[in-house]
Image: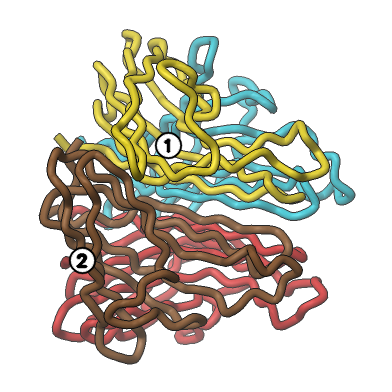
Chain colours: A red, B cyan, C yellow, D brown
Amino acid sequence: MTGKTTWAIPEGYIPEESTGPEPEMISHETVCFLNTNDEDAAVEITIYFTDRDPVGPYETTVPANRTHHIRFNDLEDPEGIPKGVPFASVIESDVPIVCQHTRLDSRQAENALLSTIAYPDPD
Amino acid sequence: MTGKTTWAIPEGYIPEESTGPEPEMISHETVCFLNTNDEDAAVEITIYFTDRDPVGPYETTVPANRTHHIRFNDLEDPEGIPKGVPFASVIESDVPIVCQHTRLDSRQAENALLSTIAYPDPD
Amino acid sequence: MTGKTTWAIPEGYIPEESTGPEPEMISHETVCFLNTNDEDAAVEITIYFTDRDPVGPYETTVPANRTHHIRFNDLEDPEGIPKGVPFASVIESDVPIVCQHTRLDSRQAENALLSTIAYPDPD
Amino acid sequence: MTGKTTWAIPEGYIPEESTGPEPEMISHETVCFLNTNDEDAAVEITIYFTDRDPVGPYETTVPANRTHHIRFNDLEDPEGIPKGVPFASVIESDVPIVCQHTRLDSRQAENALLSTIAYPDPD
């Protein structure tokens, strides 16, 4: 298993602060990385918006032979992603990885889930 | 990241008017576009039905280096998409883009979500 | 947009009779076909099980320039698909089509949804 | 329909013991295999973690012309997968198969569902 070095996720949305009874249930938008190489992957995420220039790169490392599940909510540098606005993301890695997009929406009493393998650039 | 110029989404369905307690929660069927090119994408959507000829093109623009999340509910020209009937869609762009399909179903008290990267025509 | 002539859906499961308060809410497992050709598509579905030989073909037609959303619940010939057992499906068409898999699970008061583009045989 | 011999699922998470009113509703993370060959498939699953070396292979067989839906919860040899921690998986088969990833999350009163075709290594 190798994977690809460039991936895209056109859908992205972090719901506003939840109003539900359980404040510890935080809605989150996640990207899951899998690096099956024997060397670490240096990953850069670029965030695209509807009405302004892209922001990034957000830099992270996926160690060799590890998975890394990142919440977009937690991205901070160069800046946090605003809630309640549509965004998209492009992931670039210096070694081949595999990416999957998952959302847990807990705005209401019961959770909703979505997931899809991201779009791999065929090169 | 480039993408493809032709995409298909065989699933499509806009639920009838919600009967839930919160009228502002509108069920919606969405397609998310990502254009990472330095030029705008001229996008045409064609809607396919079960028992009549396709309708379209619905025309939209995805600006350079932007994402654009469109609700099928909001398409109006050449005509609105009827609620409560199955449909499918084909997206064609003059430059490569990436497309993802998402539904938020709020017919009931709690939302349900689905999402998948659309099918890219390999050519 | 053309598509492929062979598709696979490894996941399949029709929940047993719902026990919820609204008997008209039927759980269903769906495959959505899109035929953008100018000729009809003759489609054959084969169902795979865990512990017995495959059943089929189930035959259907997707007319030229139409979409067709089929519930596995409604397949009857050569035999109905039993509820409460895992199955999988292979779709073969004489012209290229696109296939998407969707489930609405209404066993409980609130619906759950899943969807994914089916796996296209690259050949 | 043939498929591929190597597949990846970057997302994985088995929720902790449910606290809901119905203990028989077990949250599960599933991978669905489809083997359309006339010979059995010898399948090996390797599990990747965030902070330790991969574990495996977990060995299973998908008989000729059968589907096999496996819950990650049920994997025991060489060791059970811990609950409440992120993981990822790689599936390798000696003959081509097709893989789909599904989660049923029943931590709350109402279920949530996600599903996606896994990522096939193009070879």
Q: What's the residue at 13%, 44% (across, down)?
A: D39
Q: Position of residue D65 (x, y in %)?
A: 23, 39
Residue B69 as seen in the image, left or right of residue B98: right
Q: On the image, numbered disc 2 is attached to which residue?
A: D44
- Residue B107: x and y in percent read 75, 43
Instruction: Tell me, yes or no, if residue B58 can be seen here.
Output: no
For the point 41% across and 52% down, which residue is it?
A: D116
Label 1: which secondary element = strand
The part of the image, by quadrant, that contains residue D107 is: bottom right
User: In x, y percent, where is residue C1?
Assistant: 31, 27
Most extreme residue toward the front is C51
- Whether B65 is drawn above or below A74: the answer is above
Could you tell me the amino acid type at mark 2?
Answer: Glu
Q: Position of residue A40 (x, y in %)?
A: 21, 85
Marks 2 and 1, Cα distance to the nearest angstrom? 28 Å
Task: Note whether C32 is above or below A9 in the view shown.
Answer: above
Left or right: B101 in relation to A123: right
**Which of these two is toward me, B28 or C59?**
C59
Q: Name the disc covering residue A92, or none.
A: none
Taking depth in this image into account, of B38 and A73 the one nearest to the observer is A73
Q: Is residue A21 visible?
A: yes
Q: Looking at the image, is mark 2 or mark 1 nearer the viewer? A: 2
- Residue at 25 percent across and 88 percent down: it is D53
> Which of the 4 quarters of the picture holds residue B20?
top right
Q: Chain under label 2? A: D
Residue that badge 1 annotates: C100
